[in-house]
Amino acid sequence: PGVVAPHMLALLRWAIAGVILAAFAWPELRAKRALLARNAWQYLVFGALGMWICGAWVYIGARSTSATNIALIYALSPVIVAFASGLWLHERLGKVQWLGIAMAFAGLVHVVIKGQWGALAQVQFVAGDLWILACTLSWTLYSILLKRWPTDFSPIARLVLVIAGGVVLLLPLALIEAWSGLPMTQTLWGWKAAGLMVAVAIFPGAAGYLAFSVLQKELGAARASLTLYLGPLYAAVVAWLVLGEPILGYHAMGAAVILPGIYLASREA
């Protein structure tokens, strides 16, 4: 906030990520160019769900809500995806899998609230939480449709096409945002802004979405979504390596519940 406007960050995040991935997917896209227009409307739908709502709306919501609230709301995503997968994709999960999901969810909440369960009663929800809830529901639909709509393209080529759909939608919105003159809609162009854009393009952009696409193709929507529960554990390790922040007892306790939970939930029903 205050450095890059939400829609501009989402636009350049995905434009840069698209260029990076297109360098690897170009031979396939060129060979299958006759198929590009067949499902163009699907790429716009994916772009709206995954790049616009799950991109710009997260940044808008983060203006008025806390990181704890964001993590707690996003923790609902694998549970919602599991329910939706059962309804629409017939990915049935047994009792062991649901036990695993419950364990992973509890472990994530334990890490987010730093082991202080009494603090849950003090959590207050604000307007920004509605933006994050919308992102969670959008991610659920994105995950389901990735599996429900078959494709003739590999995960990386398909992601490039989805990114193209997102950029088409985000470009006019970013321009409107910049011209609006409203607070928090102006980008402070410079090295800091450029660094932020490149970072989100490479790590949670190109790498994150491509990894999720491959996982979902192999494991299904419900099981692939469980990787979201590893976020707090990865964040703790990276913060220790890069920022020197200590790994505390609640991290270890959360890991001791999350990891076996994901193992149980990922087993064949």
Image (tube, rainbow, N blue to C red):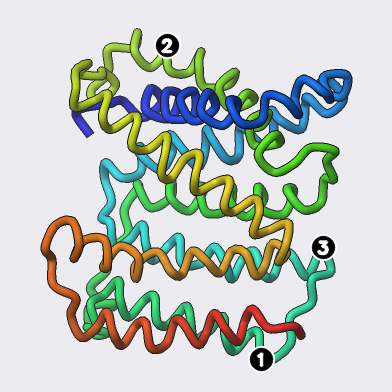
Residue drawn at point x = 79 percent, y = 77 percent: 92
Return the disc, 3 or 1, that comes first in the chain's sequence. Answer: 3
- Between marks 2 and 3, how big is the CA–CA gap? 38 Å
Depth order, front residue of 264/68:
264
Residue placed furthest toward the top:
179
Task: Judge from the rendering whether residue 57 lies leftward or rightward of residue 115; answer left or right.
Answer: right
Location of mark 3 (residue):
89
Q: Badge 2: how crowded within 10 Å, few (<14), some, or many (20+)?
A: few
Image quadrant containing the N terminus = top left
- Between marks 2 and 1, how big is the CA–CA gap? 49 Å
- Give above or below for 116 relative to 90: below
Q: Position of residue 144 (x, y in %)?
A: 72, 54
Q: Position of residue 52 (x, y in %)?
A: 52, 33
Location of mark 1 (residue):
96
Location of mark 2 (residue):
175
Which image quarter: residue 249?
bottom left
Residue drawn at point x = 42 percent, y = 30 percent: 13
Q: Position of residue 177 (x, y in %)?
A: 38, 17
